[in-house]
Image: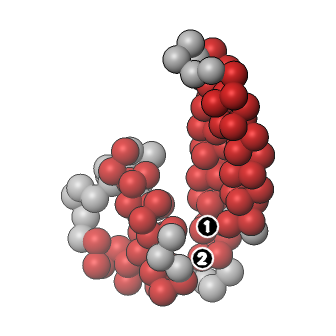
């Protein structure tokens, strides 16, 4: 997934079901093409609307799970950087480390 595609996905994923087709259009790219290059996005969205109804939620769930794993990896990285940081005192480090499980719980809630 390209950086532009990831940023668009984050924006669309947070916008709810009213942008479901847009979210899928960000996630899928016509075979042999690059994201948002070489194809008409409106025509592509029309093709998406022709997909069987069960496919859309499955695709969205797949990409939401990927986004969740990405955020969780970022949180683990933050924890590691916090522990190794020489610029923070132990009290500051403990505060950051205590917040990480809370953020993980929020991620679990958001991606249910």
Instruction: Residue at 37% x, 45% y: name it.
Output: 3
Figure check: 85 above or below 34:
above
Rendered position, 23 above or below 2: below
Identified at 61% across, 67% down, the residue is 59
Task: Describe the element under mark 1 as helix, strand or loop.
Answer: helix
User: Residue 60: x, y in percent?
Assistant: 60, 68
Query: For the image shown, how many numbered marks are present on the structure?
Result: 2
Q: Position of residue 42 (x, y in %)?
A: 28, 78
Closest to the observer: 52 or 13?
13
Color theme of the render: secondary structure
Q: Position of residue 39 (x, y in %)?
A: 25, 64
Front residue of this view, candidates 98 and 69: 98
> For residue 70, which quarter of the picture?
top right
Q: Residue at x 41, y 75 (%)?
A: 22
Mark sitting on residue 68: none
Marks 1 and 2 sit apart, C-alpha to C-alpha, by 5 Å
- Res 11 → quadrant: bottom left
User: Residue at point 30% right, 78% down?
Assistant: 43
Q: Residues within 10 Å of mark 2 (few under 14, many from 20)?
A: some
> Is 104 situated left or right of 74 in this image?
right
Q: Is residue 73 visible from the viewing direction of this image?
A: no
Specify few, some or many for label 1: CA neighbours under 10 Å numbering under 14, 14-19, or 20 or more: some
The answer to whether any part of residue 101 appears in the image is yes
For the C terminus, the image quarter is: bottom right
Residue 37 place in picture, x, y as percent: 23, 55
Residue bearing mark 1: 59
* Contact check, label 1 and label 2, Cβ < 8 Å: yes
- Left or right: residue 61 versus residue 46 is right
Label 2 SS: helix
Q: Which mark is residue 56?
A: 2
In the figure, residue 12 lies in which quadrant? Answer: bottom left
Please tell me which residue lies in front, 61 or 15.
Answer: 15
């Amino acid at each position: 997934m390209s950086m532009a595609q990831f940023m668009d996905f984050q924006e669309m994923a947070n916008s709810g079901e009213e942008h479901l087709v847009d979210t899928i259009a960000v996630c899928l790219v016509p075979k042999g093409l690059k994201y948002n290059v070489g194809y008409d996005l409106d025509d592509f969205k029309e093709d998406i609307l022709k997909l069987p109804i069960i496919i859309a939620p499955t695709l969205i769930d797949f990409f939401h799970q990927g986004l969740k794993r990405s955020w969780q990896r970022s949180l683990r990285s933050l924890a590691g950087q916090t522990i190794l940081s020489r610029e923070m005192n132990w009290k500051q480090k403990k505060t950051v480390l205590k917040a990480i499980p809370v953020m993980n719980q929020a991620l679990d809630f958001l991606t249910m």
